[in-house]
Every structure is written in structure tokens, then in C-alpha cells.
Amino acid sequence: MGNRRTIRFLLNGELREVVPTSPTQSLLTYLREDERATGTKEGCAEGDCGACTVTEAELTETGEVRFRSINACIRFLPTFDGRAIWTVEGIASPDGTLHPAQQAMVDHHGSQCGFCTPGFVMSMYTMYQNGESQPSRERVLDCLSGNLCRCTGYRPIVDAAMHMGDYPQVKTCGNSLAEQLKAIRPETLLEVSTEAGNRFYAPATVEELAALYEANPDAVILAGGTDVGLWVTKHLMDLKTVIYIGGVQGLKNIEQRDGGIEIGAAVLLNDAFPVVVEQYPEMEELWKRFSSTPIRNSGTFVGNLANGSPIGDNPPPMIAVGAKVVLRKGDRRREMALEDLYLAYRKQAREEGEFVESVIVPLRRESVKFAVYKLSKRYDQDISAVCAAFAFEIENGRVKDARIAYGGMAATPKRATAAEAVLNGASWDEAAVQKAMEAMDQDYQPMTDMRATKEYRMTTAKNLVYRFYLETTGEFEASLYAANN
């Protein structure tokens, strides 16, 4: 293994070679304090407000350049090794002509106090770089879901985003950027350390990762940083050893094999969800409501599962459909049902030095009726109070196999085994559903916290079983028709 301490990246088109001041120095801190690029703001320091939004570009294995809007506040600077970053200071033309994203904001009166404006502009710039200069309103709302504004009002901002194509076209970065990124692509192990003993490793291969983690089992494995970043910015944790997997190409694959789709541990949420939604269209709403576009551009699909949070949105539907995780330690791999990974709060059935290499999502079977429901205070960019998922096989009006999983109801994502036992073999009718709802008192003892009371959680969890029944039997549409006539 090599020992390279300097990271190389492009900032607004210019090469930077930097030795980070610490392994967990944020991109936002570097931009503001080292580069004096103060257009990038700190609003929340947790990836919620979007004031720190910048555009990231990465070279794919096929030689294409991918542009993504990301939050600079929770991403560590070393994670940008071999990539390109644009801030609001770097998108106008050399002669001072504003970029269409900027000019549209001016002409459509999209700014008042201006604090959030650079973040909005960079989300719009990302759309433009991806060939979306005249996006639909729905697309704009999705791409701007991570940007919050207190004073302007969203209508003029949305109008600006929809009309970037009204201005003379600006060339997007093409082959020249691809060549620049190819020249700085990491090929050796990156190791950033401090005199205090903090270390940041960025392996280039799965084999390097496995060896590093086996030798450093107490290390924090970092994927997108959408959770770990907050450990530093909010909890001020001192992370002694971090192993970053975002540069491991072998973990960025999505492959279909053995009746399932295998998703590597470094596949981003926004890259994995479209593939999963092809099999389970019912998950599309969850995808769009899974935090925000910048978070989904940094966070990984497997990371949300490996995290083991009791309120993560991915575990309930993945448990319901019978997903498996592939665990790796050194050269050894083993498979395990996802639900068996979670033993207790923040406790998993992983051995020391073992990590989640991938998840295998079963292909959709025609006989399976599936649904996932998310309850939260806000529609966009909010953590679930309750997340429920149902995957039932029903034949001739009887339940052959019921799988029910919830998040937000226990210390881990958990199946409702008592309710499932009531339903298995029973007629799929209201009487059986009512009995299953009653049986859920044996499955869960939810807690009260800032998101919901235990009474709310239990009541809504039971009612979601009833909703699933109504929707799968057609009774839901019938009740709506009766109510409107």
C-alpha cells in the first residue's frame, strides 16, 4: 500500500493540491477559511438548509462526467480526492457575464436577503450542467428539495429554474474536464493523519478496504457522510480512524444475479433507487421523500441499511421484500437476511472487522402485493415518525405469506411477527386485519420523542395495516367513491 497525504481536486476549474488540516475538515470550512469562497454559507451544519450547496463532478468508470449537487457542510474535504467542485464564485463567464442560473434568479426576482441564494443557484447550475436548462416544474421541485428559503418565497425561484434556457446557451464542461479528472484519478491509498493520531484512509480497491478494516476494526466506515458528518458538526466527536469507501470502484456496481439485484456499498441513493423502483414502483414516493436531492447525491443505499438506525427509511421495505446483506471480513464473504443483522440499538450481528459489502434485493414476483408508507411532519426532507412496509403473497383470497416491517416502532427496524402469524393462512378480509392490528400490541412498545408520541405511533402503525388491506382489495377506491357521491 502507498502512503499519499496530499489530495488533488479541481476547484472552479483550477487544480488544487492540499494536505487537509484534519481528517474530518469539512469542505465548507476549507472553502470559506482557506479559499475565502464565502458565497458558500453555513446555515444548519447538518445538510438540511442547502445554503452550503455546491456542485460536485466525478468521472465514472465509463469515462462520463457526472454532476451532482451536494452539501459542503457535512462532507469531509478528503472525500473529494480526484473530483471537481464548483462554487457560486466560479460559474460566471471570465468577462463577468452571469451564468443563466444566476441571470434567471435576477430577472425572476428570486432573491431577497440572499443568504440562501448561492445554494439555490448551485442546485440550478447542476441541473444546467446535466442538460436540464428548461426543466419541468416537478423536476425543479425535486432538485430544489434540499434548498430552504425564509423570505423570498419559492414561486419566483422555481420560475427562475424553469427558465434558464431563455438565455444564450453556455457550454457545459466536456471532454476537457473528463481528461482533467482522469489525470487526477486516485490510484493509490490515501492516508491523512494528524499529530494527535487521527487517521483517514481512502482505499482504492475492495481488497485494500477489507485489509484496512480487519486491521482497524474500531474505525468508522464512511460512505456518504450524511450521518457521520453530523457526528462531527453537531456532536463534536473526535473520530480517531476513518475509512472512506467512496473511491472504491468495486463497491459502485449494480448487478442482477441469482434472482436479485446486488447493490454495492458505495452506490449512491439516487443511483440505486431508480433500479429498485423498476422492480417495486411503490417505492417511488419514498425515494422522492428520502431527505433531499443533495443528501441522496452523497448518501448511499447500503449505508442507510448498514447504519442500523431505527428510523431509517430503507430498512423496512428491504426487510419486507426479504433483502439479504453480503458481509465481508478479509477474503471471506457470507450472506445474511437483513432483518438478522439488527440485534439491538446500534448493535449488529457483524464480527469484528466485518463490513457490509452489498445488499441483494430480490426481483419482484408477480404474486407479491407490496406497499411502503412514510409518516412524517413534513412531506419533504424529514425523518420518519413511522415507516411501514408490507409484502404479502395472497392466493385465492387467503394470505400465503405476510411480511410486515416497521421503522420508528422499536430500537431497531423490526418485523411484526405476531401480526404476521395471525394473517398467515387466514382469509384476507377485514376480520383478519382487525385481529392483526390487535396483535401488534405484542410486537411493539414504541417510545415518545420529539417526532411523535407512543400513542400516535401505535395508532398509525395499526391503521397502516388497514390502509394496506383497503388498497389491495379495492375497498379504498370504493370508500372514496362513496364519500364523494
Image (cartoon, helix red, strand yellow):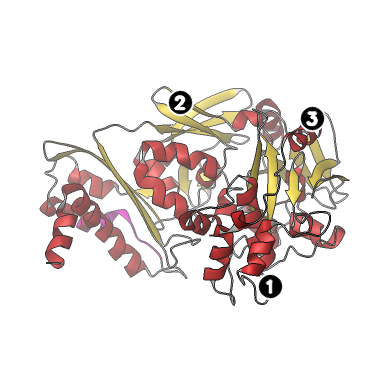
Q: Real-space Cα distance between discs 1 and 3?
A: 42 Å
| Residue type marked 2 | Gln
Residue depicted at x 68% and y 51%: 55
The residues colored magenta run 438-447
Q: Which residue is mark 2?
A: 256
Q: Real-space Cα distance between discs 1 and 2?
A: 47 Å
Decide: few, some or many residues near mark 2? Use Cα within 10 Å; few <14, some 14-19, many ≥20.
few
Residue 417, how many percent across, how many down? Answer: 28, 46
Decide: few, some or many residues near mark 1? Use Cα within 10 Å; few <14, some 14-19, many ≥20.
some
Decide: few, some or many residues near mark 3? Use Cα within 10 Å; few <14, some 14-19, many ≥20.
some
Q: Which residue is mark 1?
A: 114
Q: Which image quarter holds the N terminus?
A: top right
In the image, which disc is placed on residue 188? 3
Residue depicted at x 60% and y 45%: 131
Left or right: 53, with 31 as reference point: left
Residue 295, how many percent across, how many down? Answer: 58, 53
